[in-house]
Amino acid sequence: MNKILVANRGEIAVRIIRACKEMNIKTVAVYSEADKDALHTRLADEAVCIGPALPTKSYLDIKNIIEAAYITKADSIHPGFGFLSENSQFSKICEESNIKFIGPKSDVIDLLGNKSNAKKLMKNAGVPVIPGSDGSIRNIKDAIKIAEEIGYPVMLKAAAGGGGKGIRIANDREELEKNYNIVKQEAKISFNDDEIYIEKFIKNPRHIEIQILADEYGNVIHLGERDCSIQRNHQKMLEETPSTAVDDKLRKRMGDAAIKAAKIANYTSCGTVEFLVDDDKNFYFMEMNTRIQVEHPITEMRTGIDIVKQQIKIAAGEELKIKQKDVEFKGHSIECRINAENPKKKFMPCPR
């Protein structure tokens, strides 16, 4: 791997460029007209403008990004997080263009991007899942039947969802019938996919995610947990590792389940398996994120393992040199999200 184009902006672009510099790999920054003088453009070895300020015409424009890679002779693309990082079409086009996509294969992104299909896969692999529909539900009659089998309250969720969108809780049949079409509409508008599924609502759960690394030779390790239970509007506000709710026994069980999840999906690169944990320390698979996450630094601080560098090495075809027994956890780390909002205006976005 000689030159990596970073298909992102801001903090994560700077983070990737830093790792590349330490590995003596050349970098290409892409930027919109609004980001001409941004830090990532100045740190990279080269910088290419890929369009106007509107993200759909720059950072989300696959054609412009691929052209930038060709022009600069970049042999690899790192998508960072957000934007095109979990776009299977982008990954596939990179594969077809003989450009290494630093992340999982396109078919794996597709498989795990549909949460109902991912849940079905995990259930077949013996990974604990939240009781609910076996895949997407076809109509309101199916939803009612399943809800009555597993018991209320239940959650209706967009199969292609993320970011807390396309989720509604129903405490009884009346609410289920009321929210069914609402969730389908939200799913269609937000994700261009109106498939939804239903699952049991776990009251007051802990939201625990397990960081994994997987190479192309079937080796998978986990780097411990991050507790992201403190949320607002389904957005994580605080990430903490280790979790005060996870003991060594539970950590091993969840780590083993995350490794099993990655293996059954033929996963490569870094990824995160998210679980819900109830009061009795039962845990259930929720979803798998097929990218590096915003909160990856707190895991790096506890383990001393550079996740971005490992991503790059895996993409370059290297075998994981780190075994599970080599992973040591030291100290404690927290990351917080700072929201720029005006509390006097119902917490409206306000960057001033």
Image (cartoon, rainbow, N blue to C red):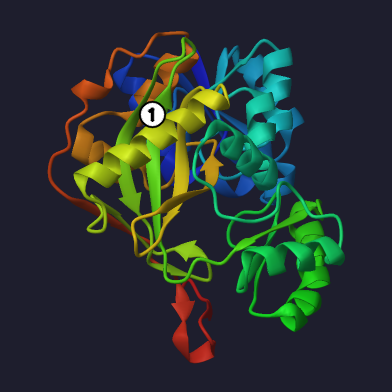
Query: Which of 98 and 182 lies nearest the eye of the viewer?
Result: 182
Residue at image mark 1: 308
Q: Quadrant of residue 265?
A: top right
Farthest-out residue, front? 149
Q: Residue furthest left?
A: 331
Residue at 12% from the left image edge and 45% from the top image edge: 331
Position of 176 relative to 115 (above/below): below
Disc 1 is placed on an element classified as helix
User: Taking the image as drawn, is residue 67 in sight?
Assistant: no
Judge from the rendering whether residue 12 lies leftward or rightward of residue 119; answer left or right: left
What residue sits 51% from the left and 75% below the top?
A: 350
Horizontal and vertical percent position of residue 80: 51, 36
Q: Nearer the viewer, residue 321 or 14?
A: 321
Task: Look at the picture and state if 129 lies above or below 149.
Answer: above
Pinpoint residue 91: horizontal percent, then vertical percent.
66, 26
Is residue 48 visible in the rendered structure shown here? yes
Indicate the position of residue 42 as horizontal and vertical percent values.
Answer: 43, 34
At 75% across and 53% down in the image, what residue appears? Answer: 191
- In this view of the protein, which residue sits in the foreground, 255 or 59? 255
x, y percent for residue 321: 29, 12
Would you say 59 lies left or right of 301 here?
Answer: right
10 Å crowding of disc 1: few (<14), some (14-19), many (20+): many
Q: Disc 1 residue type?
A: Val
Residue 56 sits above or below residue 342 on the image: above
Residue in view at x 60 percent, y 34 percent: 124
Number of numbered markers: 1
Q: Is residue 226 left or right of residue 108?
A: left
Instruction: Give the position of the C terminus as an image quadrant.
Output: bottom left
